[in-house]
Image: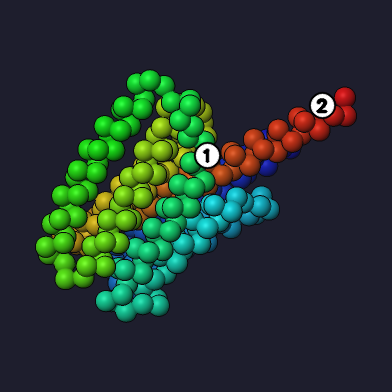
Amino acid sequence: MKNWIANTGDKVFVLALWLLVAVSCIAVLTSKASLITYSLLLYVPLFSIAYFSKYKSLKFGFIAYLLFSFLGDTSSLFFTEGMLIKASSVFYFLGFMYLLIMILPKFKLSEVQPLVGPYLISVFLIFAFFLFQIYNILNLTLESTAEVQLFGLKSLSLVVLGLVAFGVYLNTQTKLSVLFLIGVGCLFFSVILNYINLYYVYRLEFVAIERILYTVALFFLFKHAVLDKEQIQEEKSFNSSKVLA
């Protein structure tokens, strides 16, 4: 019975994943601006419903990330075109920071292997260099200084989040760390495509891939939350059985 419930939970998440992928593709293929905009409102709520249908609680950091991501997704409903990119950037930045706060305690410097530390620093410097170059280009092409600064903050927070997630994976190599790393990786490439659509060339194909990557990112982040919840429950059951014994 327990295995059936677990499999049902997996099916619900997979169903939510494919449903959102289908909605994203239909929105882009029909080229309807309203459908492209409003379909984004389904992503966080649908996965949240799938999660809370089985589990009754969620870590505060992940709840905060979902809240700010949803606010970023719905920014187009509340802000004018001039403020839209700035407002959504602020919300997404705050969401990334809460993800970073959630994973950071698992990144312990004392457990970093001798080769891992220099490797992560090298990767960070490479990403920081390219980010600085893009920042300079946008600083010359965009009139809004605030928008450029928010681009820098949002991008830097995502790079740091990705490196910390990668560092946790290299140190632990657990299923939990793999799920989180894949989720953050998909989120990273989704944001890159969003930048391309905003500042370079707008193509519906890129919008579709961006939405699919965002969907897959949420799927793996929620699967991380599910596995984390199940492991905590198993530890509690094991400790209580030891006490009773």
Whether residue 223 can be seen here: no
Judged left or right of residue 137, residue 52 is right
Residue at (46% x, 62% y) in the render: 68
Q: Quadrant of the N terminus?
A: top right
Residue position marked by numbered label 2 in the rendering: 242
- In depth, the one of 197 and 238 nearer the eye is 238
Q: Quadrant of the C terminus?
A: top right
Depth check, mark 1 against mark 2: the one in front is 1
Q: Furthest-top residue in view?
A: 114
Q: Nearer the viewer, residue 174 or 202?
A: 174
Residue 147 vertical placement versus 188 (above, below): below
Question: Mark 2: which amino acid?
Answer: Lys
Left or right placement of residue 27 versus residue 60 in this view: left
Q: Give neighbour class at mark 2: few <14, some 14-19, many 20+ (Cα, 10 Å).
A: few
Q: In the image shown, does 107 or 92 lie closer to the viewer?
A: 107
Image spot of residue 213 (x, y percent): 36, 49
Query: Would you name the residue on which mark 1 appears?
Result: 105
- 207 sits to left or right of 214: left
Amino acid carrying mark 1 in the image: Pro
Q: What is the spatial separation of the Cα atoms under label 1 and label 2, in whole angstroms?
A: 27 Å
